[in-house]
Amino acid sequence: MNIEVDTVKGFRDFLPPESLKREAVVGTVKKYFEIYGFMPIETPVIEFDELMRTDNLEEEDEAISDRFKLKDRAGRNLGLRYEFTFQLARIFKQNPNIKLPFKRYQIGYVFRDEPTGPNRFRQFTQCDVDIIGESSTKLDAECLVLVTDIFKELKVKDFEIQINNRKLLNSIIESVEINASKQVLHELDKLTKIGEDQVKANLRKFADSNKILTLFKLLEKDLSFFRDNAFDGAKDLGDLQVELSNYGIKVKINPMMIRGLGYYTGNIFEVIGPDKNTIAGGGRYDKVVGKYAGKELPAVGISFGLERVCQLANITPRNIPSVLVISIEKDKESSVLLRKIRKSGISSIMFSDKPGKALEYANSLSIPYVIFIGEDEVSKERFKLRDMLSGEEKDLTEKQVLSFLKKFSLD
């Protein structure tokens, strides 16, 4: 029997050095999530399929319709999670005594059974934060300040924050007396894919040419026009802009941003990368989390894909291992030193072979330092430490070695 030894299409492995960079990015992301007071939760990868569906199949986003569908031995309809947020509705039904506001974060795999491409996979890692139980625009702003801090530490270059408001969009459409607001939003959401002319042509199914022309002229107006004319959602959008300016964060109002069909209820936002593609996105969704709990629970959140952020992050991950101890027929003494190095929180390994082969191995893993332990080193109680990049060598005592390597500590 011939077995095809390959990864399934749309899935992939991560090996060093890429895996090390991913871990470094996750470390930074977790650090800031927790600095901002978000607590970690974990949820199952598999859920009942009916929990993942929308009430109206015509409003399903691509992410929902592209979910992986499964059946267990009992014939129950199950599926792989395509995101994390819908699981919050189940959690709040099962845990009605959760103290509000509830600030949670989650980092983990999500799955979508969709066509693959150069940067489009069926399994990817999503990083989410959500705040449940508060309706203040200050918390909308906090999501964007948090992501800004993360991206700056990761040295993501030239990103731009864009904001809009779903209430305002609906109010604009209603002001033109177009009744099919959901269908209009669905068409507007295609602007970047098919262009303005084709979107206008599609909109003729729901409105005449004059209404469509008026709609697009309105969408070009600045925020002050909508505030002065008391359009719903204009105040919330303006408040978000002010809150972010208090943090020194500049944003662009993008009237064409839609972000999903029946999901978001207020302010929405995206972070756009230098290639004009979205890095992160989110917004306020006040009618989702309380779906099964029988009450409305205000909520806001933002998420981003780890793979995309890793591509844009300009950081150098720490070396693992950082030190290679080369035993030249002195395994006992080498093991003693290795043990002390590891107790100091420094990633290290030992090699008991010819020095030439050991150095070749160190170079292959980009290990920055090696330590030689042979007869001379043991008798003198001084160890030869070599910088693998410069070739410089130093004879150091055990205490000096541990002090020098302290900068590599994982603690």
Image (cartoon, rainbow, N blue to C red):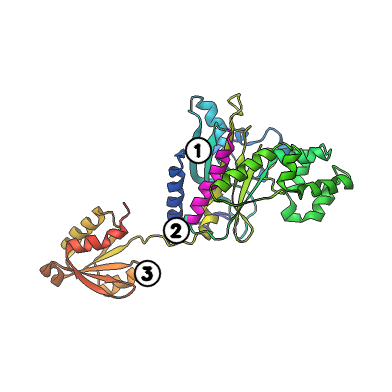
The three-letter amino acid code for the residue at tag 3 is Ser
Q: Which mark is residue 382?
A: none
Which residue in the structure is indicated by mark 2? Answer: 21
The three-letter amino acid code for the residue at tag 1 is Pro
* Pointer 1 or 3: first along the chain: 1
Could one spot residue 80 in this view of the protein? no
Which residue in the structure is indicated by mark 1? Answer: 44
Please provide percent x and percent y for residue 159. Answer: 58, 57
| Stretch in magenta | 135-152
Task: Find the distance from the CA under tag 3 to the CA under tag 2.
Answer: 17 Å
Q: What residue lies at 53% left-to-right and 43% top-to-bottom?
A: 142
Position above or below: 246 against 288: below
Please provide percent x and percent y for residue 383. Answer: 18, 68
Please provide percent x and percent y for residue 247. Answer: 53, 48
Position above or below: 61 against 8: above
Q: Is mark 2 on a helix, strand or loop?
A: helix
Q: Residue 364 carries which label?
A: 3
Residue placed most toward the observer, 330 or 283: 283
Magenta stretch secondary structure, dominant: helix
Q: Where on the picture, by quarter, is residue 71?
A: top right
Question: How many numbered dots are placed on residues in this image?
Answer: 3
Task: Find the distance from the CA under tag 1 to the CA under tag 3.
Answer: 38 Å
The three-letter amino acid code for the residue at tag 2 is Lys
Q: What residue lies at 16% left-to-right and 61% top-to-bottom?
A: 332
